Image: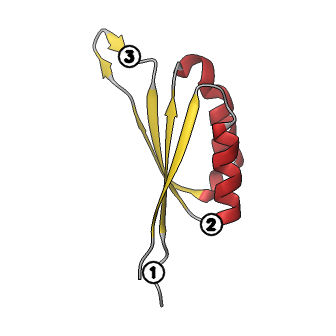
């Protein structure tokens, strides 16, 4: 049986406080297509970065992935990119 390809989304959010609500709404809408979610942002005792990066491991079909990434990129302050690792 061939191995499933790995589809990874990188989602960069600027000014997280103001732009995260519509992103979280989309994460809920496409929740059944998200296998793994990892959020990264710079944080220290006296500082928390306004920008963040979310890494998503996706499941499902290409059409759903395209719809999701297009909707993410339509949000102000958000840039989403996709990596696909096929298995020969």
Asked if the residues shown at circle 2 and circle 3 are in contact, with their CB atoms under 8 angstroms apart, the answer is no
x and y, in percent, of residue 87 in the image = 42, 78
Residue at 68% in and 31% down: 22
Q: Residue at the far bottom: name it.
A: 1
- Using the rendered view, name the quadrant where residue 24 is placed: top right
| Residue under the image location 67 percent in, 31 percent down | 75
Identify the mark at residue 60; answer none if there is no mark: 2
Per the image, the residue denoted by label 3 is 48
Q: Nearer the viewer, mark 1 or mark 3?
A: 1
Question: What residue do we see at 38% from left, 16% from top?
Answer: 48
Which image quarter: residue 42?
Answer: top left
* Residue sticking out furthest to the top: 46
Pointer 2 local density, CA inside 10 Å: few below 14, some 14–19, many at least 20? few
Q: Residue at x 64, y 51 (%)?
A: 31
Query: Considering only vertical position in the picture, is 11 above or below 21?
Result: below
Kindly indicate the quadrant of the structure image that contains residue 49.
Answer: top left
Q: Earlier in the sequence, mark 2 or mark 3?
A: 3
Q: Which residue is mark 1?
A: 3
């Amino acid at each position: 049986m061939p191995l499933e390809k790995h589809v990874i989304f990188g989602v960069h959010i600027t000014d997280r406080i103001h732009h995260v609500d519509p992103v979280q709404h989309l994460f809920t809408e496409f929740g059944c297509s998200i296998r793994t979610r990892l959020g990264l942002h710079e944080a220290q005792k006296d500082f928390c970065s306004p920008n963040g990066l979310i890494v998503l491991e996706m499941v499902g079909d290409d059409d759903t992935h395209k719809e999701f990434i297009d909707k993410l990129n339509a949000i102000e302050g958000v840039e989403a990119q996709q990596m696909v690792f096929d298995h020969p």
